[in-house]
Amino acid sequence: MPVPLVAADFFTVDTVFLQRLYVLFFIHLASRRILWAACTKQPSGEWVTQQARNLFMELGAEPIKIGVLIHDRDRKFAPGLDTVFESEGARVLLTPFLAPKANAHAERWVGSARRELGLDADRQQAPPGGGSGRVRAALQPGASAPLLQAAAAGGSLHARRAWRCQITVAAGRPHP
């Protein structure tokens, strides 16, 4: 029986108003479904650990069991994140240094999300006339961005709530 793999990664969105948003997401590799996504202006170890707890709270009612978590060695991934996954019975695998292909599924989803949001691949910035309004519109349920719609809908309310969190932050309102 295959071990259920989940990958985690961050990507950033720079708004036209020179604000950087950090988006943390967890993707189930077998189904390519976003299990949880959240965003903040300042990711801290406590925030990342809380997002891992939120993921497991939301997965409590679903038949998905996480066997292995794959993430890179970014400092934003605090030791508390690994502790939460290990307490739930999952192994944590760290990718080698300077090896983005080791977490290829997550990196590919980031690229797809960027293309759908119309973000400049070189500068990671929204195009003129875009910015937080464009990101907000693309991430709302019922938006015209099919990938983000599928990721946010995916049969789960928790992903939609997470995208609403990103919308809230992008609009400049405080993060809940």
Image (tube, rainbow, N blue to C red):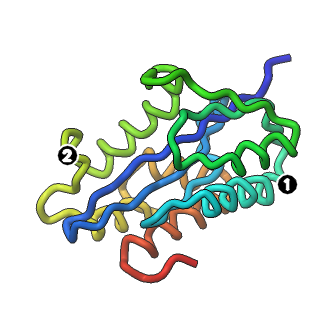
Q: Nearer the viewer, mark 2 or mark 1?
A: 2
Q: Residue at x 19, y 39 (%)?
A: 122
Q: Residue at x 23, y 40 (%)?
A: 121
Q: Indicate which disc residue 28 carries.
A: none
Residue 146 percent coordinates (x, y): 42, 47
Residue type, numbered disc 1 = Gly
Residue type, numbered disc 2 = Arg
Q: Is residue 125 above or below residue 68?
A: below
For label 1, the SS is loop
Q: CA distance from mark 2 to mark 1?
A: 38 Å
- Mark 2 crowdedness (10 Å alpha carbons): few <14, some 14-19, many ≥20: few
How many badges with numbers are in the image? 2
Relative to residue 88, is residue 162 drawn left or right?
left
- Mark 1 crowdedness (10 Å alpha carbons): few <14, some 14-19, many ≥20: few
Residue 19 percent coordinates (x, y): 29, 67
Q: Residue at x 36, y 60 (%)?
A: 138
Relative to residue 31, is residue 98 drawn left or right?
left
Residue 80 percent coordinates (x, y): 72, 51
Mark 2 = which residue? Answer: 123
Query: Could you say which is closer to the camera, residue 90 or residue 143?
Result: 90
Q: Quadrant of residue 17?
A: bottom left
Q: Is residue 78 above or below residue 72?
A: below
Relative to residue 176, is residue 172 drawn left or right?
left
| First in sequence: mark 2 vs mark 1 | 1
* Quadrant housing the C terminus: bottom right
Q: Residue at x 47, y 54 (%)?
A: 23
Mark 1 = which residue? Answer: 60
Q: Is residue 98 above or below residue 33?
A: above
For label 2, the SS is loop
Identify the residue at the far top of this view: 1
Q: Quadrant of residue 32?
A: top right
